[in-house]
Amino acid sequence: EDKVVQSPLSLVVHEGDTVTLNCSYEVTNFRSLLWYKQEKKAPTFLFMLTSSGIEKKSGRLSSILDKKELFSILNITATQTGDSAVYLCAVPAYNTDKLIFGTGTRLQVFP
Amino acid sequence: KAGVTQTPRYLIKTRGQQVTLSCSPISGHRSVSWYQQTPGQGLQFLFEYFSETQRNKGNFPGRFSGRQFSNSRSEMNVSTLELGDSALYLCASRGQGNGYTFGSGTRLTVV
């Protein structure tokens, strides 16, 4: 059965810290992996990764995929209170538009 | 371009009633999928529609149903509501390529 596992479930840090969020997956015919940030309601898109070893960056956020070891990490450097959110990892199931989500990592950044 | 629009934003219903939620995808997107999000279960897949056809259905009872219209707008219906149906219901639309965009969701409370 396809599955996506995220760790840790929860993380509490101080502003300025660097955090690493993990996502491992077991999905038939892997195509891509997506990261989302969810603050209140709508998950907002961060990254889509399809190729192994190629880092995607957006400001203080970056992500990389390892297709051999079946995992991805999301790094946030110099965290800010506005980074407090649930970070979701998702992988599309084979030949459908169904997304399989991990349970998410709740990040709390304190001043 | 306009994002994914879900209506209503909030709903309060009593047990035994039924409810209909609406999702208007991004213009030109033909794929719509629905998810239920609860604190205990995370994001769980409900259905996926493409060009008015249901392509996939998640592991939910028959009380949960949906449809998609020729303009790609989608509705989901839950009959005989139970307390456990209280959740945030999210829909996502997808166009060419692999981008999934989520709506802000409908918060359903069953009392």
Image: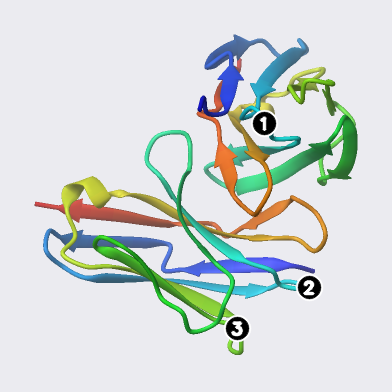
Dots 1 and 3: beta carbons under 8 Å? Answer: no
What residue is disc 2 on?
A28
Q: Amino acid at mark 2?
A: Thr
What residue is disc 1 on?
B84
Task: Give residue B59's mark.
Answer: none
Circle 3 packing at 10 Å, graded few (<14), some (14-19), many (20+), is: some
Secondary structure found at label 2:
loop
Secondary structure found at label 1:
helix
Give the percent coordinates (x, y) of residue A35.
48, 58
Q: Residue furthest bottom?
A: A68
Q: Chain of mark 2?
A: A
What residue is disc 3 on?
A67
Q: Amino acid at mark 1?
A: Gly
Q: Chain of mark 3?
A: A
A5 on left or right of B29: left
The part of the image, by quadrant, that contains residue B38 is top right
Q: From this viewpoint, is residue A62 visible? A: yes
Give the percent coordinates (x, y) of residue B52.
88, 29
Residue pictured at 89% horizontal, 37% vertical: B54
